[in-house]
Amino acid sequence: MNRDAGRVSIFLAVAMVGVLALIGLSYDGAGQLRSLQRADNLAAEAARTGGQAIDRATAIAGGPKRIDERQARAAVADYLAAAGGVRRHTVSFPVVGGETLVRVRVEVTYRRSMLGLFGFGDTVTVTGEATARALTGEP
């Protein structure tokens, strides 16, 4: 009688688990990277949208072109609501060199497809951040 009978089946079963884990890591890793890229893109576009919200009354009167923070927050929130998929966002207005900028940080959640089967969490949250300056029509 052959003593090796059945050993190949056990080896293949164990090897298949490893192969499936590698496929899951590749698939979900790529999905997480796509989510990170989406978060960065959403933050950049939202910051640009906020940068367009200048204080018109002051600008028309010949004063400095500066960001209307209330309008910028509303514009960012509207853009991100329309884009969808954003879990949370924050808007801040740092001052750099005397100029007020718009900084947007967004969180996007990626739902893992395969790695959840191997004990990893079902979701992962990635963040994207971008800063923009007021658009005034001047170079």
Image: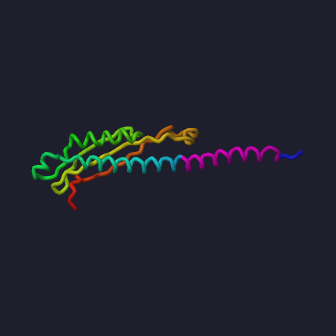
Q: Percent x, y for residue 71?
A: 22, 41
**Left or right, 132 with reference to 98:** right
Q: Is residue 136 magenta?
A: no
Q: Quadrant of the C terminus?
A: bottom left
In the picture as drawn, the residue positioned furthest to the bottom comes out as 139
Q: How is the image coloured?
A: rainbow
In this picture, which residue range is highlighted in magenta? Answer: 4-27
In terms of depth relative to the viewer, which is nearer, 40 or 120? 40
74 and 106: which is toward the camera: 74
Q: Residue furthest front?
A: 60
Expressed as whole percent of the image width and height from the top left, the position of residue 34 reads 47, 49
Q: Nearer the viewer, residue 25 or 129?
A: 129
| Residue at 27% in and 43% down | 91
Q: Is residue 8 left or right of residue 28?
A: right
Q: How many marks?
A: 0
The image quarter containing residue 86 is: top left
Quadrant (top left/top right/bottom left/bottom right) for the N terminus: top right
Give the overall secondary structure of the magenta segment.
helix
Q: Is residue 2 left or right of residue 133?
A: right
Q: Residue at x 68, y 45 (%)?
A: 14
Side of 16 where 131 appears, left or right: left
Q: How far across and down, in percent of the image, does residue 26 sit? A: 56, 50
Q: Residue at x 55, y 41 (%)?
A: 113
